[in-house]
Image (tube, rainbow, N blue to C red):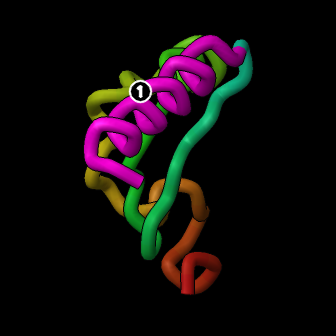
Amino acid sequence: MTPFAFKESEILKTSILEAIPHAVIGLHERHIIFANKSVETVFGWKPEGLIGKTTRMFYRSQEDYE
């Protein structure tokens, strides 16, 4: 895949995920790498404020997280 085709693929994927009316959060090694606009509607979280945070926020305790 050429760099241009890869970039187009990423743009298409992102636009589809943004259009979904459900909250979508992308993870990599327990870190949030993507959040669509619906996370604000569903959870009240600003998508840009989630990027880079760990998934610890989804658990009630450190024990549950581990």
Q: Is 10 inside the magenta-drawn segment?
A: yes
Q: Callout 1: 10 Å neighbours few (<14), some, many (20+)? A: few
- The residue tagged 1 is 11
Nearer-the-camera pick, 43 or 5: 5
Q: Is residue 27 above or below residue 63?
A: above
Quadrant that contains the N terminus: bottom left
14 above or below 37?
below
Closest to the observer, 10 or 37: 10
Q: Quadrant of residue 65?
A: bottom right
SS at circle 1: helix
Q: Nearer the viewer, residue 22 or 18?
A: 18
Q: Position of residue 24 (x, y in %)?
A: 62, 35
Which residue sits at x=59%, y=63%?
59
Residue 43: x %, y % from top left: 59, 26
For the point 44% across and 66% down, the residue is 28
Write the start and end of the magenta stretch as one range: 1-20
- Image position, residue 45 (x, y; %): 44, 26
Q: Is most of the magenta stretch helix, strand or loop?
A: helix
- Residue 24 lies left or right of residue 6; in this view the side is right
Q: Residue at x 27, y 53 (%)?
A: 52
